Amino acid sequence: MSMQNRIPTPDCEHCKSRGKSLFHFCHIEETDYINQNKTCALYKKGQTIFHENAHAYGLYCLNAGKVKLYKQAADGKEQILKIVTPGDFIGYGAMLSSNSYAVSAEVIEDAVICFIPKETVLKVFRENNRFSEGMVQLLTNTIDQTVEKMADIAYKPVRGRIAEALLLLSESYKDEKNPEGVVSITREDLASYVGTVKETAIRVLKDLKDEGLIVTNNHTITILDPKGLTRVCELYD
């Protein structure tokens, strides 16, 4: 992280995203220890946090903003695997396994990101059973979600994949500033997220809009009829 991007470090104990983070399992002494050893930085939209195959030296925790995790094919096409929202950890698999990152991470909405060195995280991991169990469960869930996503791309038509993606993204985008869960995502990123091309994503979004299920405005998408979108998903299950 470049020095000019450094900002005052948020306090883990009073972090607004603490309820979503595994750090809510930590005691005050542990969060104090993390605060003493972590750094925090402001990343602008489009900045890369880390690249695929780079070595993992610690854990990133998203305090604010949005980040996409993606893999890049030989032809340059991206496959977005996850949209990370505040409270989520980034890079935990590579850190725990001592492997290189399996994905790249890029900011898609200006973000505040904390970095905790590997030694600090592992000390809490060894000493706090609830934290370590939560981390293992997080890894397990990530594997399950990746397998499910691959199955969807292989078997579910793109209309069903986009409807499902919008419902999932809307839930993850909801917070006190965005209670309706308005999704802010480019058409390219949405297409990459569901494993299709931009033109197809635009066509499906237009169809969903014409059916009164969503409303679109530049890069934002608002769900008007969640039950209707759910029915679209269920048609292909």
Image (cartoon, rainbow, N blue to C red):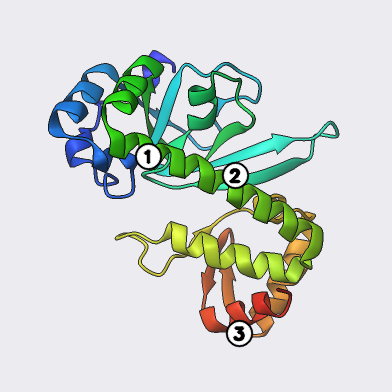
Q: CA distance from mark 2 to mark 1?
A: 16 Å
Q: Nearer the viewer, residue 143 or 171?
A: 143
Q: How many marks?
A: 3
Residue at screen point 36% across, 34% down: 132
Q: CA distance from mark 1 to mark 3?
A: 43 Å
- Label 1 packing within 10 angstroms: few (<14), some (14-19), many (20+): few
Between label 1 and label 3, give the one nearer the viewer. Answer: 1
Q: Position of residue 215 (x, y in %)?
A: 57, 75
Tell me the tag on residue 133: 1
Please indicate whether residue 114 sits to the left or right of residue 144 in the image. Answer: left
First of labels 3, 2 by sequence position: 2
- Give the answer, above or below, for where 162 lies relative to 139: below
Q: Is residue 166 visible?
A: yes
Q: Are marks 2 and 1 in contact (CB under 8 Å)?
A: no
**Pointer 2 residue:** 143
Looking at this view, name the residue that lies furthest to the right. 75
Q: Secondary structure at mark 2?
A: helix
